[in-house]
Amino acid sequence: MSLKKKKKITSLIICFLLLLLLPIVFSKPTRNLDGTGTARAPTVQQIRNKHGTREVIVDNGIIRVSFSSPQGLITGIKYKGIDNVLSPHQRARGYWDITWQGGLDQVEGTKFRIITQNQEQVEISFSRTWESGSRSRSHHHIPLNVDKRYIIRKNTSGIYAYGIFERLPEWPEFDMGQVRIVFKLDQDKFHYMVVADDIQREMPTDGDRDIHRGHAKALGYKEAVQLIHPHNPMFKNQVDDKYQYSCEIKDNKVHGWISTKSHVGFWIISPSGEYRSSGPVKQELTSHTGPTAIASFISGHYLGTDMDVHYGEAWKKVLGPVFIYLNSGDDLLWEDAKRQSKEEVKAWPYDFVASSDFPSRRERGTVTGRLLVNDGLLTPGRFAYVGLAPPGEAGSWQTNTKGYQFWTKTNETGYFKISNVRPGTYNLYGWVPGFIGEFRYKNRVNVASGSEIRLGKVVYKPPRNGPTLWEIGVPDRTTREYFVPEPYKNTINPLYLNHTDKFRQYGLWQQYTELYPNHDLVYTIGASNYSQDWFYAHVTRNNGDSTYKPTTWQIVFHLPYVNMRGSYTLQLALASASRANLQVRFNNQYTMPLFSTGYIGRDNAIARHGIHGIYRLYSINVPGRLLRTGTNTIYLRQAKASGPFEGLMYDYIRLEEPSRD
Ligand SMILES: *[C@@H]1O[C@H](CO)[C@@H](O)[C@H](O)[C@H]1NC(C)=O
Ligand SMILES: *[C@@H]1O[C@H](CO)[C@@H](O)[C@H](O)[C@H]1NC(C)=O
Ligand SMILES: *[C@@H]1O[C@H](CO)[C@@H](O)[C@H](O)[C@H]1NC(C)=O
Ligand SMILES: *[C@@H]1O[C@H](CO)[C@@H](O)[C@H](O)[C@H]1NC(C)=O
């Protein structure tokens, strides 16, 4: 054989080998395709299991989901040869829950129905209607009709879940702390949690949190523990607290868990904000040690208790659908989950939901316009938040839980388009970073089925009574720009070291007393720098013996001239308040306060590692006679101090001169 021929054969063999290798190189799974062709039309089976209890089983060849019937708790999810990805140790593994004054209600259904069953999908319902009268079975149930729906589609590795909640006007009043869907996963499998690209880590176990067995030490409140003897010594002295993984609704599209052993991911995908409550920057829990994953619809976290249900009120709200997505592969499970979450957003509003309470895309409307800001000069309302929410006062969307909300952001020139709006009557609300206050468009907006409403130019005139004398911070509804200290060495969460969200560490509030041991914070306009000299939260002073006392901050400023007969304005924007009362005095801290907020706030943003809760703006009229030529002092006293967590966060403060007109 000639050398040439030999070479040719060798290269042919190499080519052949490469061809053989190709499928291996390209079959590395990056998406959830089992490729076995097992996908088939979903089936529904009703059985009695070995304990004699009824179960409903839906199987599409990719996943097999078991429900207790007619309660409708998800008892098992079989996927990729794993018999159950959910926890074997708990009865409630995949369930709705509502916290209300009657306790915890897992809204167990009393009636099972198959809503849809065809080649493409199965939709099932577990429902419960409320009966009035104290002797009725509904006695311990929240006074709502609830219809829990689950959809399992062909060739889909996941479950769509939604709930239809209805209240009739004559039913009793109650307070509703939270409404959510919770999944408890198998702790032997799921150890790695992902909330965002830069918020993901190996997690401690539920057992690591056990303070009774001495695995952990209790901290300032029950959700936070310090890990003393964790199963993985790497976690020693770290803090575990579910609130460190809170996320604003606008960013909370997908989160969940990865089993690195089984190469399986479990994700909660929330394709829309319409069914959530309290607007786009409301913070909700995501996933946390357990392993637990949550789809939160309504909660008082970072908000307070302003969402009670009142007598005479009637409403019906569809919560969801959210998508519980499972994927598998060697790696890139998080990347695949993000890709899937984009698909779900694109498919919203889903066209396969059977309930007539869920309008299709065709039945929804669009609202467009351009937001301008008139703060002396007319400028585009750039990158502003605008949204449709139930009619109310400016800012009322912050506490609204019973209606739908549709939010978007304007572009650089102020244009906005709000799509897929359910038919109804709304107000158009908004706020613009860089400006104070709440926008509300003067007319109500009636969205009819299939309509497109062009509002044209809408103008927001932020509160202002005169030119700026000085300001502290930036109006962005957070305390992000102020001084946030480094965490204590023995209570860190290493995830947030060198992180833009450094405020998510435990115990930062305690450092105020250490930074200001003898006197409270004094901020001098012109000399101080708010990113170093303005503590991110106005907290109480720790006396060191489990008692606390109020603190009084000072703003010192110089006026070369005072208009004694003029009226100055202190614009004071708060980013958060928890059981606080802020008193404002000028030049004499022992007088009656010029202004007092009264008792405000239950958002608990200080304890929950937030940089904001609810936004409040106070425009305080300051008579010129209270000011002096030369040095002036404003005293900001937070007067409530029964513990470490009463306090405030400032968004922005500005002193305005009397108007020149
Ligand atoms: C099944 O779903 C996958 C991923 O979404 C898709 O690529 C594939 O074409 C689907 N197969 C069928 C038969 O519809
Ligand atoms: C903003 O949106 C409007 C309307 O869609 C468009 O005409 C304009 O080009 C956009 N401006 C920028 C800067 O993207
Ligand atoms: C954080 O940054 C500092 C200094 O840049 C570095 O020494 C440290 O290793 C970093 N820590 C983490 C957890 O990345
Ligand atoms: C204030 O402090 C920050 C952070 O230390 C610094 O980047 C900024 O330049 C300072 N501003 C002024 C006006 O000195």
Image (cartoon, grey):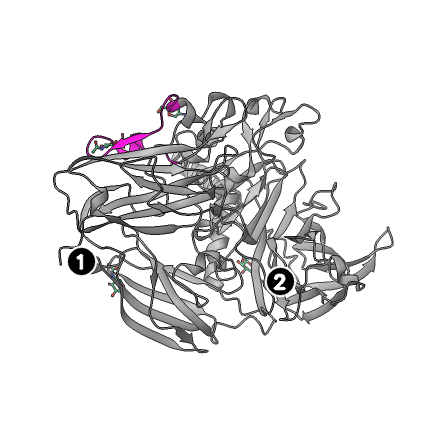
Residue at the spot x=52%, y=61% of the render?
275
The image shows residue 469 at horizontal and vertical percentages of 18, 44
Which is closer to the viewer, label 2 or label 1? 1
Q: Please, what is the three-letter code of the amino acid marked with disc 1?
A: Gly
- Label disc, if present, on residue 163 of the rendered structure: 2
The image shows residue 621 at horizontal and vertical percentages of 28, 51
Task: Quickly name the residue at label 1.
Answer: 376
Q: Using the rendered image of the protein, determine whether residue 41 is visible from the camera's viewpoint.
A: no
**Quadrant where the C terminus lies?**
bottom left
Left of 11 or right of it: where is 102?
right
Within 10 Å of disc 1 (Cα), the crowding (few <14, some 14-19, many 20+) is: few
Q: Secondary structure at mark 2?
A: strand
Q: What residue range appears in magenta?
A: 515-537
Q: Is 499 situated above or below 388?
A: above
- Label disc, if present, on residue 226 of the rendered structure: none
How many marks are shown on the rendered structure? 2
Q: Are marks 2 and 1 in contact (CB under 8 Å)?
A: no
Q: CA distance from mark 2 to mark 1?
A: 47 Å
